[in-house]
Amino acid sequence: MKITSINLVFARIAKWQIKHRVALLAGLLAFTILTCAGLPRLKLSSNEEEWFDDLSQIKIDQDNFEQLFGSQDSFMVLVRSENVFSKECLSAIKRLSERLENEVPYADKVTSLTTNLSIPQATQDGFEMVSPFDDGIPENPAEISEKAEFILSRESLVNKIISDDCKETWISLSFEPYEGGLDYAQTNIVPHIRNILFSGEFDSDDYELLPTGMSYTEYEETEVTNHECTVRIIIGFIVMVLCLILFVRSLRGVIVPTIATICGIASVMGINAWLGIAGDAAMVALPVLLGMALSVGYTIHYVNEFRLFFRRSGKRKQSVIQAVEETGWPILFTVITTVASLISFLFAGIRPLRWVGGISAAIVFSVFVYVIICIPIFLSFGKDRAPDSSTQENAGSTKTDVLFGRAGGWLLKHSKSITIVCSLVMILQIPGLFKMKVNMDYTETMGKKIPYVARLLDMLSGKLGSLYDYNVMIEFDDDDALKNPENMKKIEQMETFLGNLEMTKVSNGKPRVSSLLEMVKEMNRTLNDDDKSFYAIPDEEDMLTQLLFLYEITDADSLYSQMDADYKTTFIHVELNGYDASKMVDELAQIKQKGNEIFAGVAKTSVVGEVVNYAEMNGKIVTGELKSFAGSFIIIAILLILAFTGIKTGLIAMIPNIAPVLFIGGIMGYFKMSLDMITMTVMPMILGIAVDDTIHMVNHIKSKLEQGYDYKNAIILTFREIGKTMAMTTLILCAMFFVFIFSPMTALSRIGILSIAGLLGALGADYTLTPLLIYILKPYKKNKN
């Protein structure tokens, strides 16, 4: 494949393009208007449910749990005070509980110190379920103290609903099942909750309200990600314009690519909206900024080459044609490799990543089309001028170009030592790769600088606060199995095991593990003169059956929120002291094994909850990263081999592109940056971008060899003609990713750091390893002409 022959094809395209420039611009304008009309339909979601396959066993177990026990979503408020039993604090808890239950859509039941507490209390006929403050908050402090003492006497409540030091308590709102998932809740439920919380009614120095809950924190996450993405895109746009002003230095060179970039990105987003595909709110800034950066890069390649020829000849249209002739094929090939690398995200098997890969690939191709049409056409308008005499001595090259040429000569002179140094630098990154860890810790991904994350971590530090939890669902084979004391004791055995796991939160020596058993034990104690020694599962089946019957007739709603009507399925709720991916994956495996041991032949156990999803995501991220990176690497290698018509040359071109991967992996490992659902996009993406400079370098060297130059002069001329442009495009990409670094979101900040490291590593490799390997190995035959 001769580069000169391909270039002639692009020269003919440029001539045709200039000839029909008005019609092309009109057609492009019509296409842009049509596609952008879909933008009002664009939908972005930050729903984590999108990361899981509906057919996975985890999703099946979760749906089964919700069918039996209602929505896993709930809203909770941790109340902090010097004494939560103070009259002002209790009054606020009661008012807030009532408003939540009455004003929030799909509200099922609020449980708090003042509402629906359901504590068994002995009577002449046995016992009754009471809620101490149901009749209001007493005026007499002594009465409040008496009720507080009664609540604190219940083992099932202390350090679960109320802390033993009376400084923390929960208000918990459960929801009825609702359609539409967390996206629906964020739009139709959470705003009502926030209106209540921020109405001003509950502002006080006597207590503090700390809200949490699945849909509530998802709502806050969406607010943060939307704000961050908007800010990053706006700053990125400003950076793009400044880069154009700095490097292009002409009004036409700034306005045309700016408009082309906006139209290219908007048209893709419009098509996405017309197709009804929901995007990912947390990831949308990445393809947009990538499109801006690459658009500027393509523009600079065109403009710099145009200026080189324009300085030589002074003929505008001829210079436009020559610029397209020289840059058309390498830019198109870089687009193909970048798109191929981004499409590799489709192999990851995770829907949001498939969307990011697809939309990024579409944006890259779209901005390329807009730039390749608009820039040459608008550069062709204008007058010719006399050649620039000040650059004629160096064939149109500037002083900076000449310096890059000298750098290429110096590089060849010290080829062996530079190759050894570069190889050592890359080898030193390898140990860091093996230190990389996958960790889907929500707080680490978002970062402690985010106010609501800081609040959640603050809650976690208290006796009652928890951020992560899960439920172990136990499904017995037979109806009425829960009336059998032996089965109840098996559940108790499972509770004990769960309470001893490292990740389980412990408050004042008591594991935060709860189930139906706590209330059964409380009732048994109540029926036995409140003797603490009877806080246990009764040994007789008749007694257990009687307790459950009494529970049913006194508080059926509470009973059936913890087990099904057939008395065969229940669950154990476990709260965690934090989140560590590797430990959690290990503990879930232990739970599965222990469940099989304890309930062998009588019941099936399954674990549901967000942490189970995160643990599953850990595995998906590892396999997804490997699949997307391997896919990207293989596709690019094949394309390079085909483009450079030889396995040897293709592999030579791939060697420098290992550098950005090693740099990114090394930094993540050495600096303990976790691989998560956002940072996993960096390696395949940077590989696709980094190969662009390799293509330009190899393509240009090959072109010079075909023109009759030897290897040394071909490399020196390549440095002189495109060395500056390679530096400029990389600096522009770095400037765009630099926008991410100052984001308070840890994951976005890390994308900025890792991308810049990868891009600079790739540029360094393309300035050193790429030309040196070609110089040493001489993969092309000598041109006989």
Image (cartoon, rainbow, N blue to C red):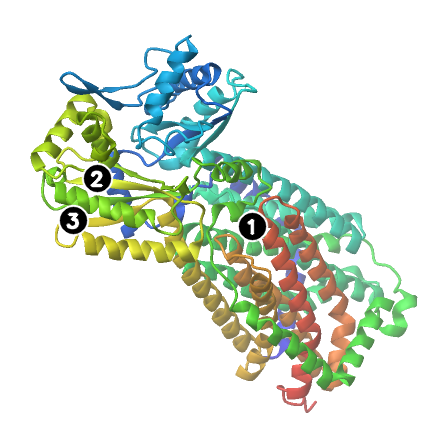
Left or right: residue 76 versus residue 6 is left
Residue that label 1 marks: 747
Between 169 and 311, the one lying in front of the other is 169
Tell me the crowding category of disc 1: few under 14, some 14 to 19, or many 20 or more residues within 10 angstroms, Cα based. many
Tell me the crowding category of disc 3: few under 14, some 14 to 19, or many 20 or more residues within 10 angstroms, Cα based. some
Q: Check disc 2 and give the amino acid type.
A: Thr
Left or right: residue 6 versus residue 192 is right
Q: Check disc 1 and give the amino acid type.
A: Ala
Q: Earlier in the sequence, mark 2 or mark 3?
A: 2
Who's the residue at 40% across and 17% down the image?
145
Residue that label 3 marks: 603
Relative image position of residue 159 (x, y in whole percent): 38, 34
Q: Is residue 102 visible?
A: no
Q: Is residue 646 visible?
A: yes
Between 9 and 340, the one lying in front of the other is 340
Tell me, for residue 570, which label it has, or none.
Answer: 2
Who's the residue at 46% across and 37% down the image?
218
Q: Dot 3: what SS?
A: strand
For residue 1, above or below residue 724: below
Tell me the crowding category of disc 2: few under 14, some 14 to 19, or many 20 or more residues within 10 angstroms, Cα based. many
Q: Dot 2: what SS?
A: strand
Q: Earlier in the sequence, mark 3 or mark 1?
A: 3
